[in-house]
């Protein structure tokens, strides 16, 4: 039976990258862990341990301070040896507790006791996700407890959308997680639906992942709350950036329109990735903070690209070492996908909850470093998903002119296709973020 594919209405690129990883491996435990007090978009946690103090695996070491802040936990047992501070490339100040590995693990390799959650009220699930420091595990990174509280104020229906859209090979970590923990993701989705009072769950998968759509539907039908909270799967196109919130919502609204005779309105869409859902599952079912995450590590400068299961707090230097180190000194190291990620200044920055990929790039893989003249080919216009004219905007940014009324989303599609290798997204998006001439 053919399945209808819902795609974003315009633009996008088929994004392939031979330097993105495919193989999976569990990373070594770091001797020194750098555990930042901010690991998401928001406010710093307050450190509650002293230099010289011994901490246990999973112990609370930084307490969130109200809305926008999240608890931070030790990811390895050991001694807190010092505090470090640095600024990211965007000028954001951060602080971290450095823990030297010592002593035994309380959770790693141990059988864990599951806790029933089906009868927990919404506020208790919110309390647990706050206690265990769960935040969105990709871009955004807002604390889940804040999001649940906001959704509890919504009066109409809510649909929980589990986004398993792999339009970018740098989402290999989410793919590996779905391969290994699909049942946990499904159970986690029911927990999240309870917390935000969603009346429906939709699993969204890319068109090359049809099999996974069936697996989600089958696993959801086995859940005790399956009758109360119906689930279905929707197949979307796999052009990048189909997974972006706006593009995904457009595709889902088209699906809603097609199915309105047999299904209720979706109402407000609460879109989350599989890593976030797995973290909710761990927090509520096993009372476990986020201790590790899957990270796609690769790029043209890396000897053996791999998807690694990495402890939070592991320095990127150690992560790249686990992948055989560098072929040659990288021109740029990027957190996230090379198309849309942010460059880092220091290879000793650690893996945090929101990092799903790390790429070390040789010069030839870094777009826009050598500027040539625009040849007027129009490629950038044809791929922009929101219908902007990147060539024109680029010129305006350079001359200090006004930007467009519609916001650039920084997807990087225009920059990826530009034959003149102009840094289109880099300049346009930066100008917007810095609120240069509007
Ligand atoms: S102008 Fe912005 S939104 Fe359009 S393709 Fe470029 S980066 Fe993406
Ligand atoms: S893709 Fe590059 S060369 Fe082609 S029109 Fe756009 S800016 Fe000019």
Image: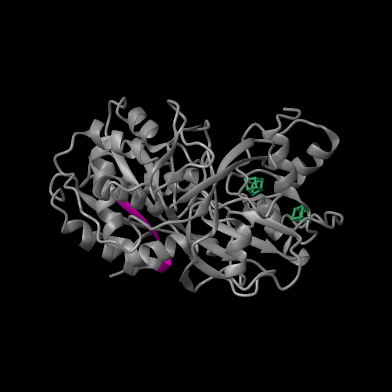
Q: At which x and y percent is residue 90?
A: 68, 39
Residue under the image location 74 percent in, 63 percent down: 330
Q: Quadrant of residue 83?
A: top right
Report if residue 96 lies within the magenta region.
no
Q: At which x and y percent is residue 197?
A: 24, 35
Q: Quadrant of the N terminus?
A: bottom left
Report if residue 207 lies within the magenta region.
yes
- In this view, the residue in front, 49 or 23, is 49
How are the residues colored? one colour
- In this view, the residue in front, 416 or 41, is 41
* Residue 398 left/right relative to 111: right
Residue under the image location 61 percent in, 57 percent down: 316
Q: At which x and y percent is residue 56?
A: 39, 48
Q: Quadrant of residue 303?
A: bottom right
Considering only vertical position in the picture, is 62 above or below 3? Answer: above
* Residue 193 left/right relative to 54: left
Considering only vertical position in the picture, is 252 above or below 366? Answer: above
Q: Quadrant of the C terminus?
A: top right
Q: Is residue 258 visible?
A: no
The kind of secondary structure the magenta stretch mainly shows is strand
Q: Is residue 194 visible?
A: yes
Residue under the image location 25 percent in, 31 percent down: 123
Q: Quadrant of residue 61?
A: top left
- In this view, the residue in front, 367 or 140, is 140
Q: How many marks?
A: 0
Magenta part of the chain? 202-208
Specify the farthest residue to the front. 52
């Amino acid at each position: 039976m053919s399945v209808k594919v819902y795609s974003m209405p315009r633009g996008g690129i088929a994004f392939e990258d031979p330097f993105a990883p495919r193989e999976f491996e569990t990373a070594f435990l770091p001797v020194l862990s750098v555990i930042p007090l901010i690991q998401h978009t928001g406010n710093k946690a307050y450190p509650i341990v002293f230099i010289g103090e011994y901490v246990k695996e999973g112990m609370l070491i930084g307490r969130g301070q109200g809305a926008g802040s999240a608890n931070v936990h030790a990811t390895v047992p050991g001694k807190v040896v010092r505090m470090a501070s640095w600024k990211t490339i965007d000028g954001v100040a951060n602080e971290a507790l450095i823990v030297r590995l010592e002593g035994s693990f309380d959770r790693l390799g141990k059988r864990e006791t599951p806790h029933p959650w089906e009868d927990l009220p919404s506020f208790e699930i919110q309390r647990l996700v706050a206690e265990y420091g769960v935040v969105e595990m990709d871009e955004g990174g807002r604390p889940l407890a804040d999001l649940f509280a906001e959704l509890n104020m919504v009066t109409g229906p809510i649909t929980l959308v589990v986004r398993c859209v792999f339009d970018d090979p740098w989402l290999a970590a989410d793919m590996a997680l779905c391969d290994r923990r699909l049942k946990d993701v499904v159970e986690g989705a029911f927990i999240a639906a309870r917390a935000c009072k969603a009346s429906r769950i939709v699993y969204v998968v890319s068109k090359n992942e049809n099999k996974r759509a069936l697996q989600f539907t089958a696993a959801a039908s086995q859940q005790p709350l399956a009758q109360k909270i119906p689930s279905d799967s929707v197949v979307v196109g796999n052009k990048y950036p189909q997974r972006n919130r706006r593009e995904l919502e457009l595709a889902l609204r088209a699906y809603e329109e097609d199915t309105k005779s047999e299904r209720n309105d979706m109402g407000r869409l609460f879109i989350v990735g599989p890593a976030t859902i797995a973290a909710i599952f761990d927090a509520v079912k096993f009372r476990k903070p986020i201790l590790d995450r899957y990270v796609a590590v690769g790029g043209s400068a890396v000897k053996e690209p791999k998807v690694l299961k990495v402890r939070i707090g592991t320095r990127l230097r150690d992560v790249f070492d686990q992948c055989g180190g560098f072929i040659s000194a990288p021109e740029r190291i990027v957190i996230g996908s090379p198309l849309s990620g942010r460059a880092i200044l220091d290879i000793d920055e650690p893996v945090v909850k929101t990092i799903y990929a790390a790429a070390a790039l040789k010069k030839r893989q870094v777009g826009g470093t050598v500027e040539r003249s625009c040849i007027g080919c129009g490629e950038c216009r044809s791929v922009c998903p929101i219908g902007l004219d990147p060539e024109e905007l680029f010129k305006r940014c350079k001359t200090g002119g006004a930007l467009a009324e519609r916001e650039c989303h920084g997807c990087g599609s225009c920059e990826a296709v530009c034959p003149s290798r102009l840094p289109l997204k880099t300049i346009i998006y930066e100008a917007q973020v810095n609120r240069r001439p509007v």
